[in-house]
Image (tube, rainbow, N blue to C red):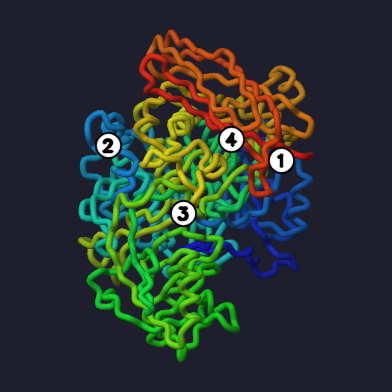
């Protein structure tokens, strides 16, 4: 799916030649025990020594060093030539060297949609609105003047906090407070490849809006009378309005570089965050080559929950990113809030569309205009790419632009610059009916693929096609929701199909949250009374919803591990929409590879009854079971492991994950899994199992009842999956069947601990 921000995924550029060789940035991972046998007094000096040994010029080693890592991993980021790289590879204690790469970035109402309100016995009230927790957000920075970051009524900064408020352009230490308790920015990876562009701020200040939007979604305080052009007017709140926020700016106009991301995670662990929220990521990558997976493993070991976006590469199968089992991977869902902007064609036919445009603007009066769709010749004109629209053909007209290639809002700017006065964005077949709205610079609407076909047929049927856009304001509750967003990345996991991903879905379509203002000549906001909000869609928006919910759970259960928090979110997720019918993906019931365990339910997640907990060592056994080599496991965990011995001691091991991914290889008929549940509800609780077996599979669970006498008691069960016939369901890439296994509290039935089951048959 195309990005609607200014951030695009580009190939890496290189710097000028030095000694006839080009410098590139590499992330170098070292054996953490290497320094103990050295004479260096600090890790920084030790890291510099590696650069010194490899230099082919008279450069100062410190001039090549970008970052020295010691928490998220042991190692450094540095600029090296190809020959220096080869020399570095031969040095002792060097585990791996990865080229620095760039990753793309992936609410007045959503909290109500999720059932959150300030009433007693509600999740917000029970959790103190997330008070005491610290959410670290890695993104494009923050707009600190937004009222979403006001600290009135906030408790003092937690004593454990070790972070800073880093000064820079248009940002100083006074911009932090008891809500926004820390802010840092990381530039070295980006600046080593690409120069910074105006109006970017070399500071934690956000110029793109993405980071302000995600931060306020996770933990923004209540802001009354929030809206976008009068649409969706109401009180804007983040998921955990009582939580503290720490911002780590790692993304810039050209993207987010892994070396900067790793540096931010490295510091955030030491700063003392409880939650890390990363609305960024690329494509499926082996865990030992995935810097986010490596950094988040260390964060998990420190008790930090890492929440990541699943990516916007849906609806393609196996497109999900951030697949590590210690990460909570979040897909996107829709709300039942619509912003109708209907197209009335000259023949009287109506086409449903959605958009936001100021209702009181003179151009929003639905004036009838001539339609133009430049479908002949250069295909760039169909997509309204910059410089592709002839002024003599579009001036004063309503231009139809196919969706794709460039950003949706950018198309409107192109139309306006060419003299067009209105725009219809037409979904292509890959987008179908997906309806991400935007704030446009001219009257515009987005129509679905079927509507686009009808519109183009009408244009071709008459010499002078006409149309008007009729804006309908905000409509709530008239459509089925949640549904899986069309763009939301899908499973199964490409690199680790034994773990079902994504984990859950959360609101990610047309989310309204805080947005930057314009700065005046003094470098400060032009009007401090102005309240800015904007609308965005993506798994980037879904991720901070779950980050905030994780903060609520952490506030109530501060001793829970990241795995327990994720289990609570997954096993209480909903698989039906607000009408009580199955959650949809387009017009079909959503599957486990579309929505994982289901749609988040924060109220139920606070009291899940039972959790599937996982120790850090369990992940190591899991990596051994995947066939990872000793060096690959060391890259991820910094642990020396003999997998032969580990697997002998853990025969029949399966990771204690809250979902089941059962893979039958050719000739296999039976799979057995062991799971362990921990009672986090009441003492003397009895649970009975309910099974919905996948088609073609028999499921046996022993025991069928779990009797917990004490709180925090753990009990194990075994489940056998027996293949009776291969099911031919899927899209050609994946053949699977699905079901679920649910433990139900026998006394009251209020606690239902549900695990989705995906069964896949492999032909080879």
Residue behind mark 1: 95
Residue 308 appears in view: no
For marks 2 and 3, give the CA distance: 33 Å
Q: Secondary structure at mark 1?
A: strand
In depth, the one of 334 and 238 nearer the eye is 334
Residue behind mark 2: 156
Q: Quadrant of residue 553?
A: top left
Mark 1 crowdedness (10 Å alpha carbons): few <14, some 14-19, many ≥20: some
Which of label 2 and label 3 is nearer to you?
3
Location of residue 435 in the rendering, given as x and y in whole percent from the top left corner: 43, 59
Give the mark nearer the N terminus: 3 vs 4: 3
Q: Secondary structure at mark 3?
A: loop
For marks 3 and 1, give the CA distance: 36 Å
- 263 with respect to 203 (left or right): right
* Mark number, residue 538: 3
Residue 653 appears in view: yes
Give the mark nearer the N terminus: 4 vs 1: 1
Mark 4 crowdedness (10 Å alpha carbons): few <14, some 14-19, many ≥20: many
In depth, the one of 324 and 164 nearer the eye is 324
Q: Quadrant of the N terminus?
A: bottom right
For marks 3 and 4, give the CA distance: 26 Å
For marks 4 and 1, give the CA distance: 40 Å
Location of residue 245 in the rendering, given as x and y in whole percent from the top left corner: 36, 44
Location of residue 364 in the rendering, given as x and y in whole percent from the top left corner: 28, 74
Give the mark nearer the N terminus: 2 vs 3: 2
For marks 1 and 2, give the CA distance: 42 Å
Q: Secondary structure at mark 4?
A: strand
Residue lying at 39% horizontally and 81% vertically, measured from the top left: 466
Q: How many marks?
A: 4
* Mark number, residue 738: 4
């Amino acid at each position: 799916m195309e990005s609607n921000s200014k951030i695009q995924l580009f190939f890496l550029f290189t710097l000028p030649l030095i000694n006839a060789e080009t410098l590139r940035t590499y992330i170098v991972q070292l054996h953490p025990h290497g320094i103990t046998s050295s004479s260096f007094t600090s890790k920084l000096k030790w890291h510099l020594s590696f650069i010194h040994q490899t230099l082919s010029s008279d450069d100062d080693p410190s001039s090549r060093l970008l970052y020295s890592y010691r928490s998220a991993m042991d190692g450094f980021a540095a600029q090296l030539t190809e020959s220096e790289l080869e020399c570095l590879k031969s040095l002792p204690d060097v585990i791996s060297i990865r080229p620095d790469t760039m990753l793309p970035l992936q609410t007045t109402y959503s909290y109500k949609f999720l059932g959150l309100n300030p009433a007693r016995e509600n999740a917000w009230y029970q959790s103190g609105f997330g008070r005491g927790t610290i959410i670290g957000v890695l993104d494009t920075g923050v707009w600190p003047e937004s009222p979403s970051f006001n600290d009135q009524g906030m408790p003092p900064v937690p004593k454990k906090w070790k972070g800073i408020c880093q000064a820079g352009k248009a940002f100083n230490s006074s911009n932090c407070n008891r809500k926004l308790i820390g802010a840092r920015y990381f530039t070295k990876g980006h600046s080593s490849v690409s120069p910074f562009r105006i109006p970017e701020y070399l500071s934690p200040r956000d110029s793109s809006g993405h980071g302000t939007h995600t931060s306020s979604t996770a933990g923004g305080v209540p802001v009354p009378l929030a809206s976008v052009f009068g649409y969706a007017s109401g009180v804007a709140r983040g998921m955990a309005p009582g939580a503290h926020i720490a911002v780590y700016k790692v993304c810039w106009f050209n993207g987010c570089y892994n070396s900067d991301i790793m540096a931010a995670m490295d510091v955030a662990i030491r700063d003392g965050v409880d939650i890390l929220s990363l609305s960024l990521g690329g494509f499926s990558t082996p865990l030992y080559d995935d810097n986010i997976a490596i950094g988040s493993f260390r964060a998990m070991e420190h008790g930090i929950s890492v929440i990541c976006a699943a990516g916007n590469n849906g609806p393609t199968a196996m497109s999900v990113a951030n697949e590590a089992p210690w990460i909570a991977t979040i897909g996107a869902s829709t709300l039942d809030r619509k912003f109708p902007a209907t197209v009335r064609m000259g023949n009287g036919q109506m086409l449903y569309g959605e958009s936001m445009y100021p209702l009181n603007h003179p151009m929003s009066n639905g004036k009838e205009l001539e339609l133009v769709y430049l479908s002949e010749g250069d295909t760039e004109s169909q997509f309204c790419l910059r410089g592709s629209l002839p002024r003599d053909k579009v001036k004063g007209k309503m231009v139809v632009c196919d969706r794709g290639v460039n950003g949706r809002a950018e198309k409107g700017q192109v139309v306006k610059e060419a003299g067009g006065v209105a725009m219809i964005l037409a979904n292509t077949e890959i987008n179908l009916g997906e309806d991400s709205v935007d704030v446009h610079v001219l009257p515009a609407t987005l129509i679905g693929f079927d509507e686009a076909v009808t519109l183009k047929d009408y244009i071709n049927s008459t010499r002078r096609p006409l149309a008007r856009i009729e804006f309908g304001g905000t409509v709530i509750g008239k459509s089925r929701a949640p549904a899986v967003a069309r763009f939301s990345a899908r499973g199964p996991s490409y690199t680790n199909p034994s773990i079902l991903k994504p984990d859950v879905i959360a609101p990610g379509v047309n989310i309204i949250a805080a947005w930057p203002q314009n700065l005046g000549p003094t470098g400060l906001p032009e009007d401090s009374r102005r309240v800015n909000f904007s609308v965005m869609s993506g798994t980037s928006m879904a991720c901070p919803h779950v980050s905030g919910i994780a903060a609520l759970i952490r506030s109530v259960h501060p001793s829970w591990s990241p795995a327990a928090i994720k289990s609570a979110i997954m096993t209480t997720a909903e698989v039906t929409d607000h009408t009580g019918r199955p959650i949809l993906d387009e017009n079909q019931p959503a599957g486990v590879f579309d929505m994982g365990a289901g749609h988040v339910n924060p109220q139920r997640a606070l009291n899940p009854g039972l959790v599937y907990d996982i120790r850090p060592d369990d992940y190591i056994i899991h990596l051994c079971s995947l066939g990872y080599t000793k060096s690959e496991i060391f890259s991820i965990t910094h642990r020396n492991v003999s997998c032969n011995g580990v697997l002998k001691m853990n025969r029949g091991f399966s990771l204690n994950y809250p979902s089941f991914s059962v893979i039958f290889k050719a000739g296999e008929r039976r799979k057995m899994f062991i799971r362990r549940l921990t009672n986090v509800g009441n003492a003397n609780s009895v649970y009975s199992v309910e099974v919905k077996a996948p088609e073609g599979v028999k499921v046996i669970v022993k025991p069928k009842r779990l009797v917990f006498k004490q709180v925090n008691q753990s009990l194990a069960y075994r489940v056998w999956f027996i293949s009776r016939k291969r099911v031919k369901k899927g899209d050609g890439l994946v053949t699977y069947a699905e079901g679920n296994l649910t433990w139900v509290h026998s006394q009251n039935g209020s606690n239902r601990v549900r695990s989705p089951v995906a069964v896949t048959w492999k032909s080879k």
